[in-house]
Image: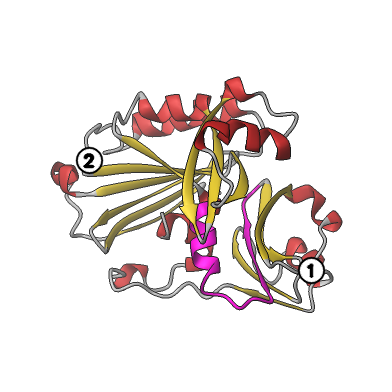
Amino acid sequence: MNDCFKITDDRFYAERTDLYDLIFEIQFSRLRFMVRNGEQLLWLEDHFLGNSNDIAACLAKCSGLIEQHAFLGIRFWKSVRLVSSLQIHTLVPASVFESSKAETYLGLTHPTASFADFEVSTEPVLNQQVVTGTLRQVNRFFRDRYPALVLVSSVAEGAKHFSLLGPDQTLGLISDSFIDLIYLKGKNRTLTAEKSPARHLRNIRAFTPALVLFGEITPFSVSYGILKDKFQTICIGDAPRQAGFSEPFQNIPAHRYFTLLHS
C-alpha cells in the first residue's frame, strides 16, 4: 500500500525555496503540504502516518518524513504556514472581546484543557474574534525546523469561507479525528463554531437544514451516511479551481484539501 499521494509540477526548483510558500497541515494520521509560487501550485504531498491518537508518535513519524525528504530539510522559504486539526477554538463577539481574556474565553468552552499545553492566538472574522489554542508541542516541532513559522486557524479560514454560503447552511470541516461545524445559531443569528470528535457524529445536532462538507469525506463514506440522516440536504463542497492549478493538479479532490488551499 502506498502511504503517499503526490502531485508535482516541473516548474518547481528546490534551489528557489526563498521564493516559495510552504503550507503544512497536520492531523493525527496525516501530514500534508503544498508548495506555491504566488497563486501557482507547484507541489502537493499527502502522507498517511498510521492510525494513532498519540501526538508524540505522530511527531516522530513527521520527523522521519521531513529528515528523509528531498527538500523539506530546507529551513528558509518565502513563508511557512501550519494549519492543524489539533486545535481548540471559540468565537467571541468583537463588541465584547478583550484580548487579555483570550485564554479565559477558551476555558469557558474547553474547561478540561490544560492551557500550559496550548499557544493562544486570536483573529477577527465576520464581527467575531476567533480564539484558537494550538498545541505547543506541535508548534515547537515545526518552529525548530522553520523559524519563521506562522500558525493558521482552520476555523478562522472556515468562517471566512462560510460568508459565501447561505444563512440556512452549516459548513462542516472534517478531519481524521474531528469535525468542526460553523453556522448561524438562534434568533440573533450568532456565528457559532463547534468541534466534536468524529467518532461522536451520531450525537451531532443540526441547527440548519443544509450541510456543506469539506475534508476527509466522500459520498460513500460511513460518516456521510450518518450526517445525511441529520440534515435535510447535504453535499460535498465545491472548492473552485484556482488560476494557479496547472494541468497536473486539475483533477485533485479540492474539497479534501480545503484547509491547505485556503491557508
Image coordinates for residue 204, horizontal then vertical, percent: 81, 57
Image coordinates for residue 49, horizontal then vertical, percent: 55, 39
- Mark 1 nearby-residue class (10 Å; few <14, some 14–19, many ≥20): few
Q: In this view, does 84 lie to the left or right of 33?
A: right
- Numbered label attached to residue 225: 1
Q: What residue type is labelled 2?
A: Trp
For the point 57% across and 44% down, which residue is it?
85
Image coordinates for residue 129, horizontal then vertical, percent: 53, 49
Is residue 253 at all visible to an observer of this figure? no
- State how far apart marks 1 and 2 are (Cα): 42 Å
Q: Is the residue 178 above or below the residue 170 in the image?
A: above
Q: Which residue lies under the disc numbered 2?
A: 77
Answer with the quarter of the image where residue 40 lies: bottom left
**Front position in the image: 241 or 30:** 241
Magenta extent:
156-176
Task: State if disc 2 and disc 1 touch (CB < 8 Å).
Answer: no
Is residue 3 one of those drawn in magenta?
A: no
For the point 60% across and 48% down, which residue is it?
92
**Front position in the image: 7 or 192:** 192
